[in-house]
Image: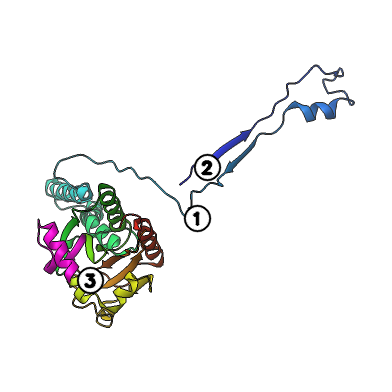
Amino acid sequence: MSNSILQISYKYWPLTRRSFSWTGQAHPATRTRSQRLARRPTQLYANSSGRGGLGDEDFDVAVFRFTLGIPGFDDRLIPRVVGTVLGALLVLNHLAGVQPTPDVQVRSEWVGTLLATLCFFVPDIEERLREAMPGRGRQKTAEFIEGATNCFFLDPSLSEASKKELAWASFSLLKNTNCCGLLVAAGGRVLMVRGAMGSQGITPGDAAGSLMALSEDLAAHGGRKLAEVGSEALSQFWLPERSAFALAGLEGLIALPAGAQCFLAQHIGGLTEQSGLLLVFSERPRALTDRERDWIAAVADKLSAYV
């Protein structure tokens, strides 16, 4: 986001010696001129003409998160700890109080119990809300997606610049969209896989073997639609539900885990005759919004210089 340029126009003319009557008011001949030249108003306006390509409704916000820094402790569990301590204090207060317990104390304990219960379940509620909100990034890991294993493999033959660009692009997509895994292929080879990929084609610790197996499977089971996307006959191919996988001939693609519910293929135009494919999928149906699909297309266009 380009910074708005704050411009201040401040004009000031000092008061000079004027002729005043004995009443302390300005002479009629000079009153208007003195009022006009005394002090001009300050003009304050913002110039935001340079937006750097962002629309009027797009804002880039940097968020700083402060943590306790306790090793092995997730700060998201702080409300749960607070709820547990609050519940223990309520029990201790009830046992140490007078018997029978006054009605006022009983009502207070009920309110405290409700608050403690709410604090205890806040982390779970937060996780469910994040999973339900589109465009908030990846919340599930590969362990919770059926038939998936987490991996990040790059073709060793790629240049360092290409590796860095592919690593940036994959991180950006996994962080800012609802996809759970992605694959980049060009020239009949799979150059990169990252995220929750199908476990059948992934051998942990063997990048070359895994990429070779995925390349052979993509050539054998890619189907006509992926061939059209790779040849730029079709720029983007979007399957919002898994029921459409079979119609597109993608059921046998081992790169897609069994838990994948939607799929997108995006063309990557190369600087030479070699073109590529960017395959993105999610474990939820209709997970990729129109804006996210546009973002995927923009990332694929940026990768065209590196595949």
Q: Nearer the viewer, residue 76 or 112?
A: 76
Q: Residue at x 35, y 55 (%)?
A: 305
> In the rendered view, would you say 234 is above or below 268?
below
Which residue has dot 3 on it? Answer: 260
Q: Amino acid at mark 2?
A: Ser
Magenta residues?
A: 194-216
Q: Residue at x 24, y 74 (%)?
A: 222
In the picture of the structure, the residue carrying the numbered disc 1 is: 55
* Secondary element at image label 3: loop
Residue 207 part of the magenta-drawn span:
yes
Q: Badge 2 is on which residue?
A: 4
Query: Which residue is rendered at x = 14% and y = 49% of the image?
Result: 88
Q: Is residue 70 visible?
A: yes
Residue 49 x/y as whole percent? 56, 47
Q: Amino acid at mark 1?
A: Gly
Q: Quadrant of residue 149?
A: bottom left
